Amino acid sequence: MQPKNLLVLMADEHQAAITGCYGNPCVETPNLDALAARGTRFTNAYTNSPICVPARAIFATGRYAHQTSHWDNAFPYYGEPESWGHRLQAAGISVESIGKLHYRRQEDSSGFDVEHDAMYVAEGIGEIVSCLRGRAPHRQGRGGIVKAGPGDSSYLNYDRRITTQARDWLHAHAADETPWVLFVSFVCPHPPFIAPPELFAHYAQMDLPFPHQWQQPEWPTHPALNFFRTHFGWEAPVDEASIQRMLATYYALCTFVDQNVGKVLNTLSDLGLAEATRVLYTSDHGAMLGARGLFGKFTMYEEAARIPMIVAGPDVPANKTVDTPVSLVDGYPTILSALDVNDDANTPPRPGQSLWQLAQGPTQERTIFSEYHAAGTRNAIFMLCDGAYKYIHYVHEAPQLFDLANDPGELVNQAENPAYTAVRADFEERLRDLLDPEAIDAQAKAEQLAKVADFGGEAAVLARGLSNSPIPGEAPVFQRNLSN
């Protein structure tokens, strides 16, 4: 592939289904829709871990969380193993970032020549309370949902700042004679659920579609899901008006992200760089938004696990959709191939494939893998999805199996249906060919306990409490009144 500039755009917690080009009739995302129209959209794109820090480490390294021990938000990327940025640097390619990284700290060598205005985990430590698996205090997760609405926030201002810096960067590098890579990472539509007032007002008056199984009588009662609700304080249902208000806020935030993406892409075009620059847009994971009585991310349902994935630019088919399953691990080979850089032949093979190649070809059979070892769980959760079926393996608990072709809303668990016995057995065999679920679960817990011990023990972790992810220059805010 002929080397070209590459602009990587990443949102935080952007559910694929709340994008116009993914079929949502209500949300306004004209810039992402236009990007998809001049490029290729992947219909079955997934995160490899539905939580921020592991997902971003996976995207950086092209390796799964269990391969690199990035288990949860207390295990941020710190420069090892090698990222795609390191390979680009070794090849003499200019590579810089603007915005959210959620890596450990600025002092680490993470593969960027410059990390502009980067967000790292709080104090270089992160969310260590999540390492207390099954013993972590319960959280007060309702407040941000029922208080959703219009206003201003540091996250909104941060994204505005990121947008301005990205446009300035493009102006400064418009005449570069050699290809570059720029990673622009927005923090929205991640909570807090506070949206620009004019955008909120637009959606507040609309009849937005409610999430699947949002009403309590419809909630799936799987033990792992019940534990999620208890841990995060979602046992009592959220009323219809609050759900509607939260949805209007989230839709507004997705449009806000789209507007910022549009400003960056318009600058790229105005500078005459569009024909010399490939673009990749994606998100680290999605958002539940009340589906199944759940909020946040954390699960393997489509709302949280499925993400947007769009590529455009030179040599990319226009106005094409590809059903081949893809995921964040595909970012590593995609970015290297855009600059015609090879991976280190001395390292173990990575599981990803180049999106540029997948965009050119017909639909391929492919199985996506995802895993979760973090907040709100007692045991590991693994997922395999091939576009037709999704198998969710809960260590020490019953699995779920969804027939996505006939049940895209994942309303009926077919794991105990005799008609699906062979499908379930096939997926469990595929999972065990990839790893030993029980052994990986035990490894994650052991390393999390070691992290707690290194911090000073459980009492020290509880005394620290739970912090937000502050924007650069902002002090973290700790919540210490957690309950058991």
Image (spheres, helix red, strand yellow):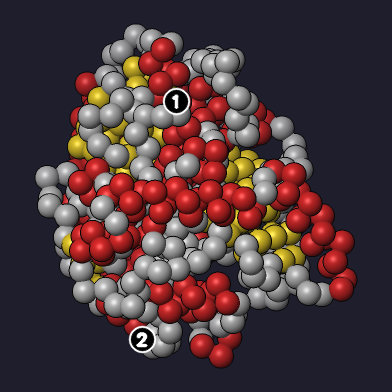
The structure residue drawn at horizontal position 51% and vertical position 86%, both measured from the top left corner, is 215
Q: Position of residue 343 (x, y in %)?
A: 55, 18
410 over 130 or under it: above or below = below
The answer to whether one can see residue 30 in this image is no
Please tell me whether residue 344 is drawn above or below residue 163 in the rendered image. Answer: above
Does 334 appear above or below 42?
A: above
The spot of residue 393 in percent (x, y) is 66, 61
Quadrant for the N terminus in the image = top right
Secondary structure found at label 1: loop
Q: Is residue 269 left or right of residue 332?
A: left
| Near-viewer residue (232 or 276) | 232
Estimate the x, y position of residue 253 in percent, counting from the top left.
Answer: 32, 60
Q: Which mark is residue 241?
A: 2
Disc 1, disc 2: CB below 8 Å? Answer: no
Between residue 194 and residue 266, name the one nearer to us: 194
Residue corresponding to mark 1: 82
Residue 104 found in image quarter: top left
Which badge, 1 or 2, comes first in the chain's sequence? 1
The answer to which quarter of the image holds residue 344 is top right
| Quarter of the image where the C terminus is located | bottom left
Q: Nearer the viewer, mark 1 or mark 2?
A: 1
User: Residue 436's x, y, as percent?
Assistant: 67, 49
Mark-to-mark CA distance, 1 and 2 = 47 Å
**Along the viewing direction, whichever of 65 and 335 lies nearer the viewer:** 65
Is residue 391 rendered to the left or right of residue 170? right
Residue at x 87%, y 73% (from the top left corner): 418
Left or right side of 60 for 100: left
Q: Residue at x 52, y 56 (%)?
A: 372
Q: Dot 2 surroundings within 10 Å: few (below 14), some, or many (20 or more)?
A: few
The mark found on residue 180 in the picture is none
